[in-house]
Image (cartoon, helix red, strand yellow):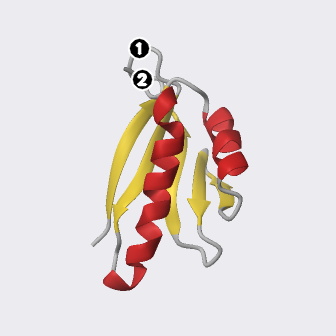
Amino acid sequence: MSSFERLDLRISPEEATDIVRSRLGNLRVVRRDGVIEFRTPTGFVVASLQPYDGEIGARARLRYRTAPRLPLYLHKMSKGREIREILDEYRVP
């Protein structure tokens, strides 16, 4: 079972991607169907960004992994939390 949480951001997905890339250079960035995915070098999705215009000031929605699909991947869920911590200052209050 996998679990994701979300965080709405006041910056664009592109700005958020640049910030994450500058701090976590060991992740791959994959763009598909308007969504930006952050993946480990082995292809495991740890977070995603997409444009969002729902709440006042929100420009992007971050979905980040908080629990792994299998215990084998337990160490990879921390990458999702690292991305969330990096982008926390840009969250919509």
Question: Where's residue 15, x and y in %?
Answer: 67, 33
Residue type marked 2: Val
Residue ID at (43%, 54%): 81
Residue at image mark 2? 92
State left or right for residue 82 relative to residue 4.
right
The foreground one among 50 and 70 is 70
Question: Where's residue 70, x and y in %?
Answer: 33, 81
State left or right for residue 9 relative to residue 16.
left
**SS type, badge 1:** loop
- Whether 56 is drawn above or below 39: the answer is above
> What's the mark number on residue 9?
none
Residue ID at (32%, 82%): 71
The foreground one among 35 and 39 is 39
Question: Where's residue 33, x and y in %?
Answer: 60, 50
The reply to whether dot 2 and dot 1 touch (C-beta < 8 Å) is: yes
Residue at image mark 1? 56
Residue at the outermost left position: 1
Tell me the quadrant of the picture where the C terminus can be found: top left
**SS type, badge 2:** loop
- Whether 18 is drawn above or below 29: the answer is above
State left or right for residue 59 relative to residue 23.
left
Disc with the residue nearer the chain's start (2 vs 1): 1
Residue ID at (67%, 58%): 30
